[in-house]
Amino acid sequence: MKTEFKAKFLNHLIQRKKDDKGFTLIELLVVIIIIGILAAIALPAFLNQANKAKQSEAKTYVGSMNRGQQAYYLEKNQFIIKDDDFGKLGLGVATETANYQYKVAGTATDASPAGVSNFGYVRVKNAPLKAYVGGVNTATIQETSEATTLAILCEGDKALAVSGPNADTEATYDVKTGPSCPPDFSRLDK
């Protein structure tokens, strides 16, 4: 009988191995934990990339505003200084998107031969995105005495909830140093 018992027992073990095709609870938990850790690492990186994509819209639009102002000055010998005249730049861009609102503001200065400095700025509509400021001025090159336009593009150092047109968000122009960014902004077009 011993041999018969051994044969049945071995048969049972072989049959048990064939039926045992699933995963154990421990194996499933380990996989779920690994997926959770990977998701915790990847999610902030993904959200950061999404914000960078939204901010690239603002950089592109402000750069286009600068180039549009330079072209308009070349043709008309003046800048667009009123927000109502934004369409005269011929950019074909919306003045307001889901994330930003684009504005034009001009101020009279003695530093500019045309008497006007132009500033394009972006108002942040959705946090946490960085603000952007662009500026176009006229200047005279010392060596050749030729008049030219100078543009600047500035990015806020920190993501803001709201940005607007005030003294802290306008690029400035100095006859000796040229255009410069407002405080807490970094120059992008060096």
Image (cartoon, helix red, strand yellow):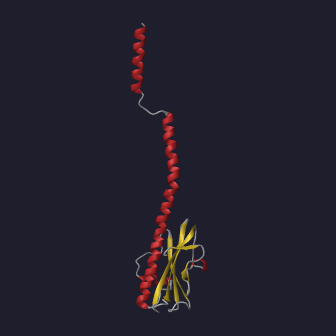
Residue at 57%, 69% in the rendered image: 157
In the rendered picture of this protein, how many numbered marks are placed on residues?
0
Residue ID at (40%, 14%) = 8
Q: Is residue 5 above or below residue 125?
A: above
Q: Position of residue 154 (x, y in %)?
A: 52, 75
Residue drawn at point x = 39 percent, y = 26 percent: 18
Position of residue 137 relative to residue 92, above or below, is: below
Q: How far from the left and from the top, in percent, is residue 91? A: 41, 79
Seen in the image, is 160 located left or right of residue 96? right
Say whether residue 44 is visible.
yes
In screen coordinates, is 97 left or right of 176? left
Q: Position of residue 173 (x, y in %)?
A: 55, 84
Q: Is residue 124 visible?
A: no
Q: Quadrant of the N terminus?
A: top left
Q: Residue furthest front?
A: 143
Relative to the observer, which residue lies in front, 46 or 161?
46
Instruction: Tell me which residue sits at (56%, 71%) in the image.
Output: 156
When the figure is inspected, residue 52 is found, relative to residue 62, above or below; the finding is above
